[in-house]
Image (cartoon, grey):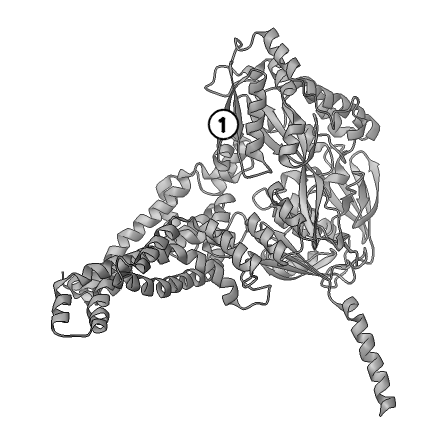
Amino acid sequence: MTIYIFRRLLQVIPVLFGVTLIVFLMIRLKGDPVQQLVPDWYSEAQVAEVRAAYGFDRPIYVQYFEFISRAVRGDFGLSFHNRVPAWELVREALPWTARLALTAFAIAVVVALPLGILSALNRNTPLDLVVTGLSVWGRSLPNFWLGIMFILLFAVALRWFPVSGTGTFSGLPLWKHLFLPALTLSMGLVTTLTRLIRSSMLEVMREEHVTTAYAKGLRHFTVIGRHVLRNALIPVVTVLGLQLAWLLGGAVIIEQVFAWPGMGRLMLQAIYARDNSVVQAALLVSSLVIVFSNLIVDLLYSVLDPRIRYS
Amino acid sequence: MKILLRPLLVAALALLICAPALAQRQIVVAQGEGVENWDPPVGWDSASEWIEMNVYDCLTFPDRETGEMVGWLAESWENLDDTTWRLSLRQGVTFHNGTPFTAEDVKFSIDRIINGSREQFIVFNQWAFVDTVTIIDDYTIEITTDYPDPAFLSEISGTGCGVVSKAYVEEVGDNGLANFGMGTGPFKLVDYDRDQHVILEANEDYWGGKPEIDRLVFRVIPEPSTRIAELLTGGVDIAPGILPQDLPRIEADPRLQVVQYLTDRVYGLTIAHAPPPGVDAVATSIPEIREAIDYAIDRDELIALAGGGVPTLTRLTPPLPCWDTVDPPLYNVNPYDPERARQILEEIGYPDVPGGPVITLHGTFGQYIAQREIAETIATMLEDVGFEVDLDIREFSTFRETVYRGSNEELMLQSLGNIITDPWIYILNYDSRFGNRIPVRGRFSNPELDTLAAAANVAMDPAERCRILNEYAHKVVNFRPTIELFRMADSIAMPVNVSWTPPPDGNLQFVNLTFND
């Protein structure tokens, strides 16, 4: 197990290297960063001055090396727009996105698990058809539209929840502000997980060890709980890890709709304002979150399925 | 016992009756963006500038009705010679932390801009007109300019004009000021969360009198539809930038009113007089083609599309000085005449003209009201008189880095505003010696316009300046470096129990908001 963890940690190094390179190059691919910084009436000489001031006139590998050496110290430079360290903005935004993503994650698991199990156990019944139908329908809805619809229904018409914000000003408890954006963000994950749990359960239920368990005279619920569900959850755990990236991507739009001051909104604002240092810092931190959450999932996977760590 | 209770009961009753009057008057305003920076010359994003102007005061202030500059922290002024201005400062004014406002603070505020750099202060170039600031006494300063500057009083009320406290900045440093603003304005900053809210409280000691609002809150809500939902549920009281499609929902709410007002922005077409590199010719190099385009556009129809506005041929619009001396008038004019446009095209033999027959119209979307729809409608209008149009709509960042940087062909739709209440920016826009604004995208050089612009920029006699500007405005209209379309309107939603007139530059200053009940 220790060797497996060590090997897996070693694999993260080239991934991180690749991530930093992609983040660094993506900013340059957007176009000349200097042209994006200066106002349109700047002369060529003034543009050259700014280029030198920001170090963009040096060879690209020198710039990359400096980017890496500063990034490991948490120094991403000053936000061009806010005039505060880019890292500070990311540090302020990260907990808000974490709250949103984790709540969405919890909602998704709590809703999808019973739905998926019920659907599998009642295969081809009206209940199964309704759950599967709703999953397909839910998956095809764009989440910004869903967010606006939830606002209109739960906040404007029913007045159960506040429209937007985090409660720093309204005086309402955080969960009231958190519920609608988290529900919106979770919808895609709920539908994916429901279908996955259903198909995974059905696959395991067809396996010989399940038939053996029934033949041994075990009760239906014991077979489902101990022999089917446990094995059916192995692929679900993998998908959960991968879905975190999807959640972070979805948060960009959700945070904008619900005025939630997280990483997604920060990144969107930085892209609009051409605030490269913030875009770099936010992209890199988001990528690191995904890389490490995948690492954790892989390690968890090896706990659930011993074949992995012995292979 | 009864005798004892009676006064108590009377007191309790009196308190109950007075309670509504004693309640705090709060206004919550929805904003698309938050304040990025509280240092006045650093932030040029509109949210920072608009919200900041409730906390800071400038030396002068434009009267939005007349366009005249009125005294603010400077009570009066005299022009000692063409380049020297002596300003008498208001006495008895204090900063929010209680320290007195003096000439030292004014000198400090201006000096830190002009001794800084463009990287440090985004408004650095805009303040380059100031040569020196000299303190005469505690409440008198002298400012000299590099050249005679008729726009001086407007320029000192321009972006970055908020006077900061020398002692406060020296104490907290530039970063401290960036994170927490402190000025002499009608409201003082109480709480600030960059991406969520700004909470201000009325400055009880404000020299202009305490504002009627006790607590003024700005909430950051980027999504327009969310702002409307907040407005309808009472989460916010005021929301600017209401889109035409949202008007019916707001007007149906008896608690709300929508006020439409004219902004200082003008929609116009920038015309290429010569081709960009790599292109052989543009049809708009022919004056008659430019004239036909002008006649082909029905400005009133575009205004209907945008939900309001005034047709104009010039950017010399009210309340800018000299707008009303333009003769014959160029404001509130719609020269739409499709027949005349068709006739001109026939006379010059279009489509067999150099650069013809295709007229490219560049545009973008998402920045201003109905931007894409206006470009599409103009294309249809041009096709209606016989032009062949290639409509090129690009996403904003691509538009900015390609078309806006000078790869534009015949026509480009854009919206331009004024940063000060003076025709200064309008004049400079067509001056081919000034940087690379419209002349570079238009690729023209017009010595006649340059001479008039140079004269208007230093004409200290207001009447003489208006005479030059009259000639200049008509020459611009005939030469057509741009074809102006209409002055834009904007709508703001607010409660029915308040009276407030939004200023045309969009500044959200609430010192003069009053409650009707």
Q: Position of residue B462 (x, y in %)?
A: 82, 30
Asked if A69 appears above or below B481 in the picture, the reply is below
Q: Is residue A196 visible?
A: yes
Residue B436: quadrant of the picture: top right
Residue lying furthest front: A126
Q: Is residue A42 left or right of residue B486?
A: left
Asked if A223 appears above or below A9 in the picture, the reply is below
Q: Position of residue B211 (x, y in %)?
A: 77, 58
Residue B133: quadrant of the picture: top right
From the image, tell me which residue sits under label 1.
B392
Q: Residue at x 33, y 49 (%)?
A: A19
Residue lying furthest bottom: B1
Q: Secondary structure at mark 1?
A: strand
Locate the N terminus of chain A and report the quarter of the image it occupies.
bottom left
Q: Residue at x 14, y 75 (%)?
A: A217
Q: Is residue A70 visible?
A: no
Q: Position of residue A37 (x, y in %)?
A: 51, 40
Locate the C terminus of chain A and report the quarter of the image it occupies.
bottom left
Name the amino acid, label 1. Answer: Asp
Asked if A83 appears above or below B449 in the picture, the reply is below
Q: Position of residue A291 (x, y in %)?
A: 32, 56
